[in-house]
Image (tube, rainbow, N blue to C red):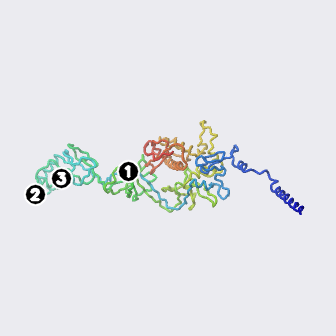
Amino acid sequence: MKTRNLIIYTGLIFGGLLIGYLIFGGSEEPQTLDEHIAESHTNAEGEIVYTCSMHPQVRQNEPGNCPICGMELIRAADAGQDESGALSENAISFSQAALALADIQTTPVRMARPVSESRLPGKVVVNQKLVSNVTAHFPGRVRELYVDYMGDYVRKGQKLASIYSPELITAQRELLETVRYKEQNPRLYEAARRKLILWEFPVETIDQIERSGEVMEELDFFSPVSGYVSQINISREDHINVGSMLYRIADLSEIWLEFEAYEAEVSQLEQGDEIRFTVSSLPGQSFAGEVNFIEPFLDEESRTVNVRVTAENDQVRMKPGMYAEGIVVSEYEGKEQLMVPRSAVLWTGSRSVVFVDVSTSDTPAFEGREVVLGNRAGESYVILSGLEEGEEVVTNGTFKVDAAAQLSDKLSMMNREPGTGANRGAHDHSSMNMNEETSNPVMDHSEHQMDDDSLSVLVPEYLKLRKALTLDQFEEARQIMTIFSDERYSDIEGLRADFKALSEDLIKRIEEEGYEGTLYKQFCPMYDGGSSWISDEEDIANPFYGSMMHNCGETVEKIN
């Protein structure tokens, strides 16, 4: 029995050794996990490269935490890779942790009728139809002023001044002479009486002269309308001539609001359109009126057209000269069109890129896609091609998705040729010779496109562009703008229009990613319905108007 058991145990041992030999004996020495990583995720020096899913500009040769957000670093080659093979070549995948930290939000592409909302700067002005000039119909000398300061309210028929005039005395004598013979010659009497009426003397005063039979050496001047005195052109003892303007009186019960519409907005306005507006001195109150006049001429300096609205002015709450802001909502004619929020679009001048949600059940992922933009409609853009209704596009965290796409050499805002490797190593500047005069870290391509779109490189170039625009230096500004856009500009106004869009995208990115150093967010209410830009100086130097309105605007925020 013992011999039999020994034989069985010996057979089992040799059998196990044989099976192990058949499985492992013919293979090469197995790689360790570190050796496998080193083979597929190393740089040129053989070092493993680690990066952050949220901040792909962070690259180091050892594991650890991101110095910006504290998130655990991952292997660079794993960032944005799809292991399942279910995603397209341009898709960039995220871990669930990275997705949550990036606070990425999406919005569906929808069909809607574009509605444009334009904000127009303006001010309250006097209704010129309700302005009356009180003029002299005869020569004379001012003896007394009963209304002697501007802003005083006068009623129709109220005394304004007393006038001494030889011609008035003569006219009274003619009247009294004709009174005696009015039965025999009524036409002469009526003519003498009508002469004083045409000089705007009240009938009561003329009757008083007839009854008394005496000539009045001084006659009082009366207001023909009710309103506020806006101008006085006479003083006591002044001599006046026929046609001299004595007073100007404005009725403010109804006023005008004159708004400035920029060239791009004029085509969207028609007489009869409703404008909602606010007045700066009446916070919290909103008013409405209809457009009743659009000026037929463009102001060549401000590039605007005046748009007029008439409004009731109960209790004279709106004073001429007060600033106002109008809001015009215009609905485009035609059928519904594809619409996406403005925050979904990354704009580079000649290209517009959005990121579409192409997540699978296991992997959050987003695909960069070029689109053709139509009209801007308020806070949305019309999409002419590149998207379909119902697709989800990234509207929050867009720049973070774009940064991850650039790291993985996928289609992105600055990478128009994904898969070519042109964007790899974009954040490695160790080989740059900054002392060479020809070295320019953001203009390495013949088309002047950026290799490095990090804010540390992008912002200084932007600030140079801003300064050139404030000084009206078109050629210098055009050269700098080639860094950001392929557009060929023929004038500085077109460049300034694109500078506004560039500023909006840059401000959004700075707010999302942060920036080392102090910047100022500044705002001009006059340009294109209100426009913002970034400056490294707190003092205002307006890049949209240059020397024409150099100090137009205000600093609204300090960014550290």
Residues tagged 1 and 2 counted as in contact (Cβ below 8 A): no
For the residues carrying marks 1 and 2, which lies nearer the camera in this image?
1
Residue 416 seen in the current view: no
> Label 1, label 2: how many angstroms apart (C-alpha)?
64 Å
Q: Position of residue 223 (x, y in %)?
A: 23, 52
Q: Nearer the viewer, mark 1 or mark 3?
A: 1
* Position of residue 6 in the picture relative to residue 313 (left or right): right
Circle 2 sits on which residue? 184
Density class for disc 1 (Cα within 10 Å; few <14, some 14-19, many ≥20) is some
Could you say which is closer to the camera, residue 438 or residue 95?
95
Q: With 490 as the anchor, is 404 left or right in this view?
A: right
Quadrant that contains the N terminus: bottom right
- The residue pinned by badge 1 equals 323
Horizontal side, residue 197 vs residue 58: left or right: left
At numbered mark 3, what does the secondary structure look like: helix, strand or loop? helix
User: What residue is pinned by disc 3?
Assistant: 196
Q: Residue sitting at 53 percent across and 62 percent down?
A: 111
Residue lying furthest bottom:
1
